[in-house]
Amino acid sequence: MASVPTTKSKAKAPRSSLPIFEGLLPIDPARVPNDLIAGATLAALAIPETMGYANMAGMPPVTGLYTIVIPIFLFAIFGSSRHLVVGADSATAVVLYAGLAGLGLAASSSEWIAMAGLAALMVAVVLVAARVLRLGFIANFLSRSVLIGFLTGVGIQVAMGQLHGVLNVSDGSGTTLEKFATTLDNFWKSIQAGTMVQDSLPTIVVAVAVWVIILGSDRINKKIPGALIAVVGMIAISYLGLLPSSVTTLGSVTAGLPQIGLPQGVITQSNIVALLPTVFSCFIIILAQSAATSRAYAVKYEDSFNENVDLIGLGLANVGAGLSGTFVVNGSPTKTEMVDGAGGKSQLAQLTAGLIVVVVLLFLTGALAYMPNAVLAAVVLLIGLRLIDVKGMQGIAKVRSGEFVVAALTAATVVIVGIEQAIILAIVLSIIEHLSHAYRPHDTTIAVSADGHLRATSVSSGTVIQAAPGLVIYRFGAGLYYANATRFTEEVLTILDEADPKVEWFCLSAASIGDIDYSGAGAIRQIASEIKKHGAKFVVCELEPGVADIPARYGLEPEIAGVYTFVEDVIAAYAKRDVTT
């Protein structure tokens, strides 16, 4: 992926010339207090959130905290974005869970944790390789509409998957839909059996209380750490023994910093091959989501960032994750917004958050043992609901019905079939959508209006507009290649047959033609022959620099009577009947 030249040219302060500390340097002393406050805010909000994401990934909750220790430090040092926050993320957590569950592993088992670490290391290798091989462009094959549909599907799947924890019933096994159906069935059976009040109601009350605190604090002030208040409050209530025995808690949570080392017993060829689909899916999500988030904030603050440097930072962050017993990390839009909303403007905020989490791991894990499981289920379910982008889907539907269908199909595939299949479908649908636009470009004929300005009329209107009697200027609206070459030829033949008066000069405006492949060149040769049969001359104007050498390369020069720089030049030459090459 290319970096953003506009943001680099507008950077307000000089940046480090080294590939490290770019997101941190230069440090503005006046902004240090804001960054420290933003870091504390991030820690307060991210602690319960990352534990929830660990739950999504089938990992022990404490491993969620590990994602904002070593990984966040490594990206802060080696990444270029001053704003992007790296850590556990819902989309990659769900992908990881689906991939490991598909291998028949038991969630939170030692093998599951080791395989999650191996997946993080593999993602790191792919990210660094993508930087070396310049494969970042792959992320561009996930359009914005597809990403909205994908994240909406992930949100639905996450919310459905956490309902059993809120209702305190078993969800059985199988696909997301099967588990959701089992959850509802078991809850209904508990109502019929009269055990719901005793077994489920206390857990539901805890979950509802968490939602009220989080949503209420958001409504009062988005900077209030509602999730942290809910977590601390419920831990206190649980510690005081005020919750019924049916409300289960996390239990013992490993204290101390994560152990450093390679995942044990799983680094084999068969496991690496088995994880490849999961790793590829995570790689695509990380590319698309991290780059989009960094770009958005770089533009917002007229700041600079380098996507290639970020790939290295993300790769090293995942190395840190794989070596510290946690799972794949990603650039997080929600955490980045947390820091931005709290006034943070550099990676100093992220470093501050990491240090606070270190303190929690060293001294406060004992308290986490009293956290009700319903709290995490409620937090994660709410995260899932927030991922469901109803406004985004409605916005797509209003302006692009085709793209809405693509987004809806992607969302449905996530829920019904699976995350990895949805990633592949999303890429395929995005490519098909792009090809359909290129296949049916907005082609026009150009004329001069009464006030002397050029005006374009769509060819699809069925009316052939002439720039002057006998002069047709036809602008093809896309690159000319094998898929649309036939359409191009048919449109030109139709114009030649229907033009009144008869065409004397036919001008191809190449302003929108960024490339011409072999089939496209053949189509130009064909229309040149047809134009000649109609007794007209074939001229070209507005050749883009990228295709200026194509007439010579494909041997088309003898077919072209004249080449002009601008449309106005063609009109002036036609008035004199002056063909200029």
Image: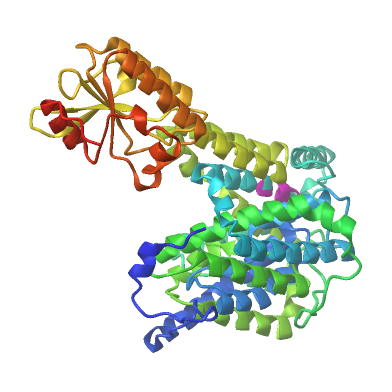
Residue 415 falls in image quadrant: top right
In magenta stretch: residue 469: no
Instruction: Give the vertical position of 327 relative to 153 (above or below).
Output: below
Q: Nearer the viewer, residue 314 or 247?
A: 314
Q: Which residue occupies 68% across, 45% down?
A: 157
Furthest residue toward bottom:
29
Residue 299 image offset from top left, x and y in percent: 38, 63
Which residues are drawn in magenta?
A: 158-165
Q: Is residue 143 left or right of residue 300?
A: right
Q: Which residue occupies 15% across, 31% down?
A: 573
Q: Which residue occupies 68% across, 55% down?
A: 282
Look at the image and tell me whether residue 508 can be seen: yes
Instruction: Give the vertical position of 125 relative to 547 (above or below).
Output: below
Q: Nearer the viewer, residue 51 or 92?
A: 92
Q: Main secondary structure of the magenta part?
A: helix
Q: Which residue occupies 42% across, 66% down?
A: 298
Residue 391 image offset from top left, x and y in percent: 46, 43
Look at the image and tell me whether residue 249 can be seen: no
Viewport quadrant of the C terminus: top left
Residue 479 image offset from top left, x and y in percent: 43, 36
Q: Is residue 230 left or right of residue 527?
A: right
Q: Nearer the viewer, residue 83 or 309?
A: 309
In magenta stretch: residue 159: yes
